[in-house]
Image (spheres, helix red, strand yellow):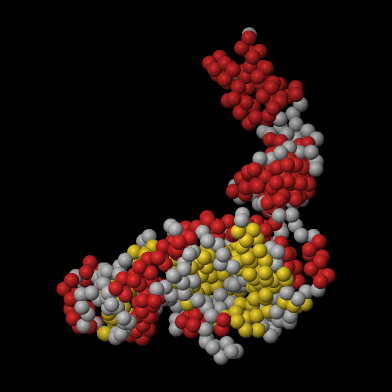
């Protein structure tokens, strides 16, 4: 796609959880629980209130039309603050320090005094009905090749409650995640290609991880992307889970906007003005319908229909791979209705004759499209009005909205773009002054960026690009450097700290119990030839299960002290005797399978190089006889 010609502009909003011990506004730990361990539940209903400026937010208003109940699961690790039964405590100073550190790394200017605001949230993800956000810094920039990308703002925020399940009646949330500190970093919409957005996200992610003070793992970082093209509209895309999806999501959003603009032009050509929007009850025409798709409506349900003039063929048109304009309408209606249909599709469902009857009753001509809705009357009417509104919007082009990214790269309507009416001051949290002294202290101990660290590892330890990247980005990079000072082999240490650990982890070994001392002792023993490197995984396995043990105890329990040369020779002679047929058959090629056999019998107690050398000699001797 010609992004330049289309005038693509995109920006990022990155949310990263901070790895503090305590939450942002209370002393609860920032650990996640299994929702089955919850010790209590609270149920709330959402009420829309005016903001203190007297405005009601569009997004909040729309949400309130859906009558829903929110259930919150609490734990022995949550308190009255998460329940919204006690006012928040002061901002966690550790979280402020980390936010300031990140701001400085991004070249931003911190504020003199941090003020906390309330941002209305309407989806129930916070028990208080708002999210607290504190503006920390602004005016940063990063250079991406020749382009400078500005970082507009950095805010410190409380993480929302985790959604566990959702149905028509309501949503179940878990309170363990609520209140974990996070930073929200917003870039200005200066990226001009999908690829550039991805690079910016990667770079900021690298800076965040460089601090060593952010949470790691799935769900601890989230990217929202805002996308627009010159003639289109600003769309905020939520819930982009992986960096790998960023490009696809932007490409498909641009495609959606281009196709919606084409539909707009076609509607204008067809002379479509605005839908009158008369909603007609056509229930009686459905009394005898036999269809697996339109079930016989429930007793209290009605079938309402509305015509969208000049829309024939357009409602069924594809705007993203596998998504049609009708999905734009039905996304908005879904939460209200049990069944929505349109006449670009219906002939396959109820037959042309039936459609003709409906068309006649509602006074539609052949160039119109009908949308039908099956539900309780008030819900159906409300939903159809939304459909009418969306159809009318199609004449303008593209409505600005917040959308949710789908796993395939498409997206679905979430809510209108929230306005400024969403924010007002949080009076329960006092402002925090940021002294020059505090900033200077943070400035003087800024971490090395992982990109710089990687380069240093390549230079200092001769690691290749991949291994250097792996360990430089790892949370064990400091441990790696400590071990290297013992004179260990760099590649062995990297592999142990990355691949070996993840293999043990996959086996279900509790590798999180391993501490730095364990690793240092293991490598001390290997460096001093007290243990063969082949024995490392076995020793780590024991230490992870019994962290109070030392590596030397574990290795002697396993009988892992290195075998003497004599014992190795003895073992090799046994193996050769046992496999002499193989040697006769394959000659020197028998080395590899025999090597495997010896190593297996020695169970990590020998050095592979030594075994290979002796084995080669012994095979040669055997063949000479
Ligand atoms: Zn708490």
Vertical comparison of 175 with 510: above or below: below
Considering every residue shown, the one lying at the far left of the view is 353
Vertical comparison of 161 with 565: above or below: below
**In which quadrant is the C terminus drawn?**
top right
Instruction: Say if residue 565 shows up in the picture.
Output: yes
Vertical comparison of 404 with 445: above or below: below
Considering every residue shown, the one lying at the far right of the view is 437
Give coordinates of residue 119: x percent, y percent. Answer: 60, 79
Q: Quadrant of residue 612?
A: top right
**Residue located 56% across and 84% down the image:** 421
**Residue located 70% across and 79% down the image:** 115
For this view, does 135 lie left or right of residue 551? left
Q: Quadrant of residue 550?
A: top right
For this view, does 59 lie left or right of residue 599? left
Give coordinates of residue 435: x percent, y percent. Answer: 81, 73
Q: Quadrant of residue 384?
A: bottom left
For this view, does 298 lie left or right of residue 502? left
Foreground residue among 550 and 12:
12
Give coordinates of residue 266: x percent, y percent. Answer: 31, 71
Give coordinates of residue 488: x percent, y percent. Answer: 76, 38
Foreground residue among 41 and 261:
261
Vertical comparison of 598 with 197: above or below: above
**Residue located 81% across and 66% down the image:** 440
**In which quadrant is the N terminus drawn?**
bottom left
Considering every residue shown, the one lying at the far bottom of the view is 54
Instruction: Say if residue 41 shows up in the picture.
Output: no
**Badge count:** 0
**Residue located 74% across and 29% down the image:** 563
Considering every residue shown, the one lying at the far top of the view is 625
């Amino acid at each position: 796609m010609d992004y330049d010609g289309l005038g693509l502009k995109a920006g990022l909003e990155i949310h990263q959880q901070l790895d503090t011990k305590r939450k942002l506004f209370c002393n609860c730990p920032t650990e996640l629980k299994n929702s089955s361990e919850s010790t209590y539940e609270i149920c709330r209903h959402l009420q829309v209130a005016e903001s203190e400026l007297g405005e009601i937010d569009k997004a909040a208003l729309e949400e309130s039309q859906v009558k829903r109940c929110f259930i919150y699961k609490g734990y022995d690790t949550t308190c009255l603050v998460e329940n919204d039964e006690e006012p928040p405590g002061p901002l966690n100073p550790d979280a402020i320090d980390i936010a300031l550190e990140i701001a400085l790394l991004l070249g931003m200017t911190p504020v003199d005094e941090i003020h906390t605001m309330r941002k209305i949230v309407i989806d129930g993800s916070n028990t208080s009905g708002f999210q607290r956000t504190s503006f920390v810094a602004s005016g940063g920039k990063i250079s991406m090749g020749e382009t400078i990308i500005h970082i507009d703002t950095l805010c410190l925020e409380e993480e929302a409650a985790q959604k566990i399940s959702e149905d028509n009646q309501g949503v179940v949330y878990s309170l363990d995640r609520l209140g974990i500190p996070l930073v929200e970093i917003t870039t200005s919409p200066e990226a001009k290609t999908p690829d550039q957005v991805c690079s910016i996200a990667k770079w900021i992610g690298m800076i965040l991880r460089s601090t060593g003070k952010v949470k790691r793992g799935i769900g601890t970082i989230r990217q929202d992307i805002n996308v627009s093209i010159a003639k289109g509209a600003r769309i905020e895309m939520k819930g982009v889970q992986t960096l790998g999806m960023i490009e696809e999501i932007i490409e498909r959003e641009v495609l959606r906007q281009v196709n919606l603009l084409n539909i707009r032009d076609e509607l204008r050509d067809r002379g479509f003005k605005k839908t009158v929007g008369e909603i007609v009850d056509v229930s009686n025409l459905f009394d005898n319908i036999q269809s697996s798709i339109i079930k016989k409506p429930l007793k209290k349900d009605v079938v309402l229909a509305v015509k969208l003039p000049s829309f024939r063929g357009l409602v069924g048109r594809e705007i993203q791979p596998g998504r049609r304009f009708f999905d734009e309408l039905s996304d908005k209606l879904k939460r209200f209705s049990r069944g929505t249909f349109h006449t670009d599709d219906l002939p396959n469902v109820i037959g042309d004759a039936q459609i003709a009857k409906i068309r006649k009753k509602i006074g539609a001509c052949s160039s119109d499209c009908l949308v039908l809705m099956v539900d309780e009357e008030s819900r159906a009417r409300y939903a159809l009005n939304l459909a009418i509104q969306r159809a009318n919007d199609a004449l303008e082009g593209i409505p600005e909205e917040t959308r949710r990214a789908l796993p395939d790269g498409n997206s679905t309507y979430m809510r209108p773009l929230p306005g400024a009416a969403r924010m007002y001051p949080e009076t329960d949290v006092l402002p925090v002054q940021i002294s020059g002294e505090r900033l200077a202290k943070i400035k003087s101990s800024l971490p090395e960026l992982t990109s710089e660290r990687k380069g240093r590892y390549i230079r200092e330890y001769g690691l290749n690009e991949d291994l250097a990247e792996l360990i430089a980005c790892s949370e064990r990079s400091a441990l790696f450097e400590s071990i290297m000072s013992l004179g260990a082999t760099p590649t062995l240490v990297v592999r142990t700290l990355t691949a070996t650990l993840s293999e043990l982890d996959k086996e279900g070994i509790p590798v999180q119990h391993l501490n730095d001392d364990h690793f240092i002792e293991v490598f001390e023993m290997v460096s001093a030839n007290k243990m063969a490197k082949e024995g490392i995984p076995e020793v780590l396995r024991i230490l992870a299960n019994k962290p109070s043990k030392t590596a030397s105890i574990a290795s002697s329990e396993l009988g892992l002290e290195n075998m003497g040369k004599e014992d190795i020779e003895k073992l090799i002679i046994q193996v050769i005797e046992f496999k002499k047929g193989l040697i006769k058959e394959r000659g020197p090629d028998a080395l590899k399978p025999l090597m495997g056999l010896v190593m297996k019998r020695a169970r990590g107690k020998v050095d592979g190089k030594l075994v290979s050398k002796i084995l080669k000699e012994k095979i040669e001797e055997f063949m000479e006889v």
